[in-house]
Each structure stands twice: as C-alpha cells, then as structure tokens.
Image (cartoon, rainbow, N blue to C red):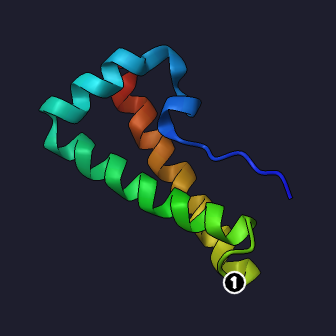
Amino acid sequence: MTHVHHTLLEEFPEHKEKLHELKLNDAHFVSLHDKYDQVNEAINKAEAQIENLSDEHLEDLKKERLALKDEINAILSK
C-alpha cells in the first residue's frame, strides 16, 4: 500500500524557512511540531501495516493530526 508521509515540510513547502525559524525560536511551535510528528508516525506505521490499530483509533489519530495541522497553519499564516 502506497501512502503519503504528510511531514510538515511536505504539507507546507512554501513555508520551509518559517518552519525552520519557528523550530529554533518558538517553544509552543516546537511542542506542536513534536506532537504532529508523533501522531503522524503512528498513522504512517498503521498505514504501512507495521502496527495494528483499530479503524476507530486510526480515524481519531487522523482527526488529531488534522487539528494539529490546522493550528500550525494558523501560526504559519501570521
């Protein structure tokens, strides 16, 4: 099964420099970024069938990833 990794750099390539700057200077952003990476990694492992998750749990993780992405997008759009 082919799947997209959804890293923040893949999601926001136009904000490459700002992503780097925020990771260096904004503790709240670093926390959001780390949480996004953790959730995204869990989703990627489930989609690659490396780890088994219930469909419900996988959907909850995808909703959490989307909420984090929306919050990160709001920061990037400032």
Density class for disc 1 (Cα within 10 Å; few <14, some 14-19, many ≥20) is few
* Residue occupying the far front of the picture: 50
Q: Where's residue 18, x and y in %?
A: 32, 19
Figure quadrant of the N terminus:
bottom right
Label 1 residue SS: loop
Which residue shows up at 57% across the image and 32% down it? 11
Figure quadrant of the C terminus:
top left
Which residue shows up at 57% across the image and 31% down it? 10
Q: Where's residue 16, x and y in %?
A: 41, 19
49 or 23: nearer the viewer: 49
Q: Where's residue 48, x and y in %?
A: 73, 65
* Residue occupying the far right of the picture: 1
Which residue shows up at 34% across the image and 27% down it? 19
Q: Is residue 30 left or right of residue 57?
A: left
53 or 61: nearer the viewer: 53
**Among the 4 quarters of the image, the one containing residue 53:** bottom right
- Considering only vertical position in the picture, is 18 above or below 35? above
Q: Is residue 24 left or right of residue 2?
A: left
Residue for badge 1: 52
Which residue shows up at 44% across the image and 54% down it? 37
- Considering only vertical position in the picture, is 66 above or below 16? below
**Among the 4 quarters of the image, the one containing residue 52:** bottom right
Q: Is residue 18 left or right of residue 47?
A: left
* Circle 1: residue type: Asn
Q: Is residue 15 left or right of residue 24?
A: right
Q: How many marks?
A: 1
